[in-house]
């Protein structure tokens, strides 16, 4: 089994929905989208472990990522859609997606060509 597959590390109904919408390797997402999603998921996991884990949502994590401040853009609609679809995501599921994204960004279908 290949390790850039989203479901390699864990398969749940919420991850199945992500795979159904964006492909088994999230191949419908470009590198930038995967990097942004990784930022949101990392913030989500951190904040859920630090502050009120049951009430902090992925949508709040996406707002807290401060895309406007850091990169001068509003949060892309695609990312809003993904966060909405992942409503109710557990930290375990978020870590599962983070592991797959990390592999895809570094070695897989979203890696950046070295010049």
Image: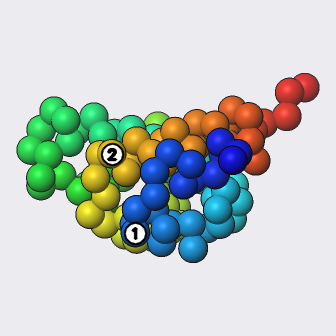
Answer with left or right where residue 49 lies relative to residue 86.
left
Q: Secondary structure at mark 1?
A: helix
Q: Quadrant of residue 51 in the image?
A: top left
* Residue at image point 57% right, 73% down: 20
Residue at mark 2: 92
Q: Where is the C terminus found, in terms of image quarters?
A: top right
Count of labels shown?
2
Between 77 and 92, the one nearer to me in the picture: 92
- Using the image, determine if residue 11 lies above or below residue 44: below
* Residue at image point 23% right, 56% down: 57
Give percent across and percent down for residue 93: 37, 51
* Residue at image point 40% right, 69% down: 13
- Using the image, determine if residue 115 lies above or below residue 9: above
Give percent across and percent down for residue 38: 49, 43
Q: Residues within 10 Å of mark 2 (few under 14, many from 20)?
A: few
Give percent across and percent down for residue 77: 50, 68
Between 34 and 19, the one nearer to me in the picture: 19
Q: Secondary structure at mark 2?
A: helix
Q: Quadrant of residue 41 in the image?
A: top left
Check whether the beta carbons of the residues at disc 2 and disc 1 lie within 8 A of each other.
Answer: no
Residue 80 makes an appearance in the image: no
Q: Which mark is residue 36?
A: none
Q: Which mark is residue 13?
A: 1
Answer with left or right where residue 72 lies relative to residue 51.
right
- Using the image, determine if residue 74 lies above or below residue 13: above
Give percent across and percent down for residue 7: 54, 55
Answer with left or right where residue 95 lies relative to residue 115.
left
The furthest residue to the right:
115
* Residue at image point 76% right, 47% down: 109
Q: Does label 2 or label 1 sit earlier along the sequence?
A: 1
Question: How is the protein colored in the picture?
Answer: rainbow
């Amino acid at each position: 089994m290949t390790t850039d597959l989203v479901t390699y590390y864990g398969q749940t109904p919420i991850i199945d929905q992500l795979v159904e919408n964006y492909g088994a390797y999230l191949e419908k997402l470009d590198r930038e989208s995967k990097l942004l999603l990784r930022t949101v998921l990392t913030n989500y996991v951190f904040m859920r472990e630090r502050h009120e884990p049951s009430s902090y949502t992925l949508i709040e994590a996406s707002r807290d990522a401060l895309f406007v401040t850091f990169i001068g853009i509003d949060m892309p609609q695609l990312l809003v859609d993904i966060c909405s679809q992942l409503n109710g995501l557990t930290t375990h599921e978020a870590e599962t997606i983070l592991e797959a994204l990390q592999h895809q960004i570094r070695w897989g279908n979203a890696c950046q060509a070295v010049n």
